[in-house]
Image: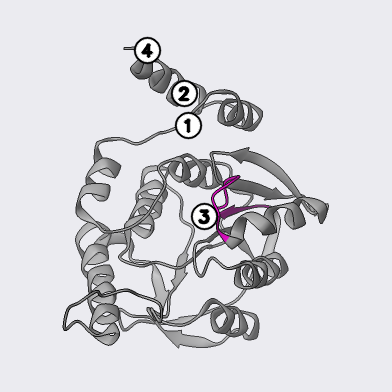
Amino acid sequence: MVANALRFAARRLGKRSGRRLAAVANVIDRPVDVSDHFTDHLHYAIAGMLHRGNLHCFDWAIRNRPSDAPLLEIGSFCGLSTNALVYYLRRLGSPQPFFTCDPWVFEGAMVGDTPTSRRDYAAFVKDSYVRSIETFSADRKPHTVETTSDAFFEAWTAGREVEDVFGRRVRLGGPLAFVYVDGTHDREQVTLDWQHADRVLEPGGFLLFDDSWDGAGWGACTVMPDVLASGRYELVAKNPNYFFRKVR
């Protein structure tokens, strides 16, 4: 009963101001969780490691977007977080274009004592992504580019036209309103992803780092003090992952 009451209160409080979002996320002993029937079923049906606290940040970044500039998700895996982001775009009536990138290369993937090759594993994950988007987000498919985040940002900065995994041509470029960093989690790559994103994220735009909560043990954790020390971002919340707004 107590747990349910706290969860209900957290969800109600999470719908208020940005200051309240930060306060709730840091005062209660669990992240603000705005999961609903649809997002629950996304978690049931799609493989992935999406922390439910990120859903509140997705909702907040779209609801409080500085403009209708695009969103970018770095790292898509089987499409769990991608479909969740499309859900909030749809639910909030946001016209923002949505881009994602993932090379679907798993050099360290463990396939165990099976005949499954890393190539087969990668093909299965990519196919799962495409099928999940076709199933849950057919009306608002993101432009997903099969490439690394470094190559994606290079193409974005150059304003190149590329083909996405659904066979559509699209021109990249311009400012971004929200970047979700969920690719390779080592310190070097997270730092690069932040630096690339910083160059195109507009003032007032949002930045969310997956697996960055204090004590998570990933390289992303070690980059968070650098983001804070830059003086270019304010911490909106730790829910429990670090969620920033660019101030300059």
Mark 3 nearby-residue class (10 Å; few <14, some 14–19, many ≥20): many
Tell me how far mark 4 sits from mark 3, CA to CA.
29 Å
Q: Indicate which disc, 4 or 1, sits on the residue closer to the N terminus.
A: 4
Is 232 on the left or on the right of 153, as rendered?
right
Tell me how far mark 4 sits from mark 2, CA to CA.
12 Å
- Which amino acid is tagged 2? Ala
Q: Indicate which disc, 4 or 2, sits on the residue closer to the N terminus.
A: 4
- Which amino acid is tagged 3? Asp
Which residue is labeled 4 in the image? 2
Q: Picture coordinates of residue 57 (x, y %)?
A: 51, 43
Q: Indicate which disc, 3 or 1, sits on the residue closer to the N terminus.
A: 1
Q: Are marks 1 and 2 in contact (CB under 8 Å)?
A: yes
Tell me how far mark 3 sits from mark 2, CA to CA.
21 Å
Q: Indicate which disc, 4 or 3, sits on the residue closer to the N terminus.
A: 4
Q: Picture coordinates of residue 164 (x, y %)?
A: 38, 81
Which residue is labeled 1 in the image? 32
* Image disc number at residue 10: 2
Residue at the (35%, 67%) spot, across then down: 77
Q: Which residues are magenta?
A: 205-218
What SS does tag 4 mark?
helix
User: In which image quadrant can residue 198 be found?
Assistant: bottom right
Q: Quadrant of the N terminus?
A: top left
Is 58 on the left or on the right of 66, as rendered?
left
- Which amino acid is tagged 1? Val
Which residue is labeled 3 in the image? 210
Is 225 on the left or on the right of 192, as rendered?
right
Q: Nearer the viewer, mark 4 or mark 2?
A: 4
Q: Main secondary structure of the magenta part?
A: loop
Q: Nearer the viewer, mark 3 or mark 2?
A: 3
Mark 1 nearby-residue class (10 Å; few <14, some 14–19, many ≥20): many
